[in-house]
Amino acid sequence: MENKTLLVSYTDQGKKKMEEIRGLLEDSGRTVFGLERPRGGDFLGEYWRQVQEIIFVGAAGIAVRLCAPFIRDKFTDPAVLVLDEKGKFVIPLLSGHVGGANDLALFLAEATGAEAVITTATDVNGRFAVDVFAKKCGLVLTDRAKAKDISARILKGEKVGFYSEFPVLGRVPQELVQVESRQQLGLFSMSIAVEERKKGETGEQVLCLLPRNLTAGVGCKKGVPRRQLEDFLMEKLAESGFHPGQVKRLASIDRKAEEEGLKALAETWQIPFETWTADQLAAVGTVTSESAFVKETVGVGNVCERAAILGSGGGRLVLEKTAEQGMTLALAAEDWSVDFDKTVCDRPGAGQL
């Protein structure tokens, strides 16, 4: 989805620096909002849930005081950074890992010549960080407490077990010990399992990470409300062992492109809604069933499975067509793999290449 960034400055020199980095951020594909000398902190209430990043150009103390009433946790708060008005230092204050504040600080430092001041423990010590790994690899972090425990154990020098149902590319970070079966994770005090579906019993010492690689192919009668569609999708995901965060996009036939319930669902979940013509859908030859009535009505006899397969780039069906109260759903999964070279092995101590 679109990345939105708020810039805030309080002085003439700060405004000049703000405009300088605004261009850099827009060139990187972000939508940027700029505020000059806002009074008080009420403006943050408007932007806190609407933007992914907030950059204060000025003193860190101002940013801390203004943000304090809105801070919840690192998994939902936007990335918050401070850049001094002369551009000497850029400091991530909130959501360094999950929100990407550390990465943004490094980007700004490289682009402007500032020095990035990174204070998160795993970065300072050059250690593998499971929340960074999950974010960069497109994985759903299912248990925050376990993730925190893993980071704490790694900082103490403990080895963490690692198992993946998917192919593993690159060299596994030195803090992890890769095993061949899930059962072997019981040899470790804490472990990570990268799996397609969440198991019913993951074990107290196992953090389950799930890939965000699902396309939900959806069909419905005209006028089905968002909440009904959402309840249907959530129910079928839970029955199949999938997490809502694994859904990467919605897909349907082009005749449903303006269907309000589907559009609202995609907006609520902050995922794309893609549609395909009947001819494009018909090019997917193999589906589990066909409906003569649907084919006569829209030109193709099974919309949801074909839409899911097309949306996932020719992926495999992991949930066949299911229907309920004028709605249909199918899920398809993109091919996926763990690639340590691209995600976490770009700094000393996080793995040896």
Image: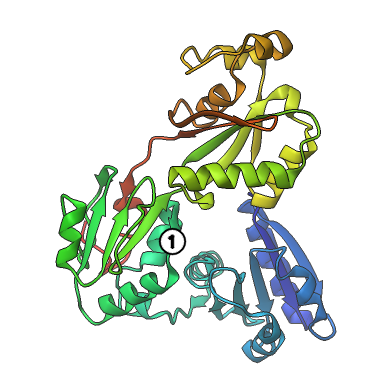
Q: Residue at x 34, y 49 (%)?
A: 195
Quadrant of residue 271 within the rendered picture: top right
Q: Position of residue 47 (x, y in %)?
A: 75, 69
Instruction: Please say which color scheme the image uses.
Output: rainbow
The residue tagged 1 is 142
Q: From the viewer's perspective, is 221 left or right of 190?
A: right
Q: How many marks?
A: 1
Q: Which of these two is toward me, 132 or 292?
A: 292
Residue at the farthest right position: 39
Q: Position of residue 52 (x, y in %)?
A: 64, 63
Relative height, residue 307 to residue 186 (above, below): above
Residue at the farthest front position: 325
Quadrant of residue 156 within the rendered picture: bottom left
Relative height, residue 30 to residue 131 (above, below): above
Q: Is residue 80 at all visible to an observer of this figure?
A: yes
Q: Residue at x 73, y 12 (%)?
A: 297
Q: Inspect the image, locate mark 1, and give the three-letter code of the amino acid beneath it.
A: Thr
Q: Secondary structure at mark 1?
A: loop
Q: Which of these two is toward me, 73 or 143?
A: 143
Which corner quadrant holds the C terminus? bottom left
